[in-house]
């Protein structure tokens, strides 16, 4: 009596899965047909994306992220700067005729892995990009469930960013990034105002003026340059997006502080892996 019942259950599952597959296939085919009916214009893409990334300073700042890593060989901080997840979202929106998404594909004892996917429906090009994030603290203890969830979301955001910026050729978005960067940097006329703004924003995260100057290697606020401002606002974006924490970003050696108590250790989940291990997964895709 059990065998027929089990057989009917399997058959029912097969029909449901087949129906979902057909619906997904039909949906994608419809989107491909629409993409071919209304092909993108590269000029329109550049114009629309340029308007979006330079619409105001707040948006431009969100398009740039930066991290400072201690270089033991050079005995100085090295800057890792690039387009942020917000910039990638603008690129995908203006590019059009595409599908993009991210999901967690595995959760191990020490790492969680997320996969970003970008599918150009018009050109029939699909890109996948996987990112690993550590889910253990400096003491080797595994994060709690809610912290693992936050870490997984951060990994998915990075994976999606990398997939989009690989799927859309860099030759098309590089100039857009430079425009956003120029807005963030400003010029000599806006330098003093932007310095004060950056210091004020970092103060909200408990970062002092002295810490900022020490990290940049400057003697005083007047020594902060327009390029330094790009790094500072990029760091703010990285902190807000969960790529790093204030504790990690402004510690002496680039590592997250282990003396900040439970709160500091909990925030360590958002920091990207050290440059010596999985840093390539957290940086924008290279050529």
Image (spheres, rainbow, N blue to C red):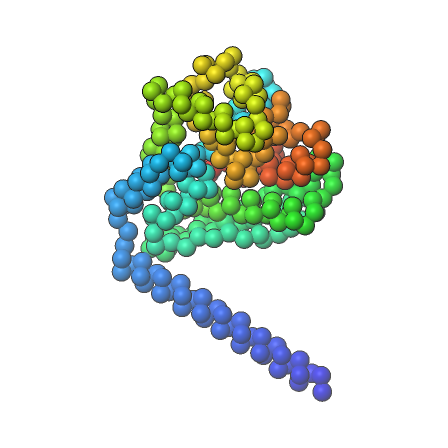
Question: Disc count in the image?
Answer: 0
**Residue at image location 41% in from the left, 46% down from the top:** 89
Can residue 143 be seen? Answer: yes
Q: Position of residue 65 (x, y in %)?
A: 47, 34
User: Is 242 on the left-hand or right-hand side of 259?
Assistant: left
Looking at the image, which is closer to me, 189 or 140? 189
286 is higher (above) or lower (below) than 16:
above
Q: Residue furthest bottom?
A: 1
Q: Nearer the viewer, residue 70 or 58?
A: 58
User: Where does the C terminus fall, quadrant-wise?
Assistant: top left
Q: Which residue sits at x=49%, y=25%?
A: 199
Q: Position of residue 81 (x, y in %)?
A: 47, 30
Q: Determine the image quadrant of residue 137.
A: top right
Q: Is residue 212 above or below residue 144?
A: above
Query: Going by the picture, which residue comes out furthest to the top?
Result: 219
| Residue 193 drawn at (x, y percent) | 40, 23
Residue visible at 56% across and 18% down in the picture: 210
Left or right of 39: which side holds 92?
right
The answer to whether residue 279 shows anywhere in this view is no
Where in the figure is residue 145, as x and y percent of width and height? 68, 50
Instruction: Name the quadrant of the N terminus.
Output: bottom right
Q: What residue do we see at 62% from left, 25% from top?
A: 251
The image quarter containing residue 155 is top right
């Amino acid at each position: 009596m059990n065998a027929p019942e089990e057989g009917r259950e399997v058959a029912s599952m097969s029909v449901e899965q087949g129906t979902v597959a057909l619906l997904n296939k039909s949906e994608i085919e419809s989107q491909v047909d629409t993409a071919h009916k209304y092909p993108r214009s590269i000029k329109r893409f550049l114009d629309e994306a340029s308007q979006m990334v330079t619409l105001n300073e707040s948006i431009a700042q969100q398009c740039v992220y930066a991290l400072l890593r201690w270089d033991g060989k050079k005995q100085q901080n090295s800057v890792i700067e690039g387009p942020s997840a917000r910039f990638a979202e603008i690129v995908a929106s203006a590019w059009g005729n595409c599908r993009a998404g991210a999901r967690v594909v595995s959760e191990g004892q020490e790492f969680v892995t997320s996969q970003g996917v970008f599918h150009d429906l018009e050109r029939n090009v699909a890109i996948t990009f996987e990112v690993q994030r550590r889910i253990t603290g400096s003491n080797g203890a595994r994060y709690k469930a809610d912290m693992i969830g936050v870490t997984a979301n951060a990994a998915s955001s990075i994976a999606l960013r990398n997939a989009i910026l690989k799927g859309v050729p860099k030759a098309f978005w590089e100039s857009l990034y430079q425009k956003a960067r120029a807005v963030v940097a400003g010029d000599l006329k806006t330098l003093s105002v932007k310095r004060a703004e950056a210091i004020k924003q970092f103060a909200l995260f408990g970062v002092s003026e002295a810490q900022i100057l020490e990290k940049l290697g400057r003697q005083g606020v007047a020594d902060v340059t327009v390029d330094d401002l790009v790094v500072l606002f990029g760091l703010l974006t990285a902190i807000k997006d969960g790529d790093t924490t204030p504790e990690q970003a402004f510690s002496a050696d680039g590592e997250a502080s282990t003396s900040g108590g439970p709160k500091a250790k909990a925030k360590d989940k958002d920091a990207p892996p050290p440059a010596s291990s999985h840093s390539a997964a957290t940086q924008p895709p290279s050529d």
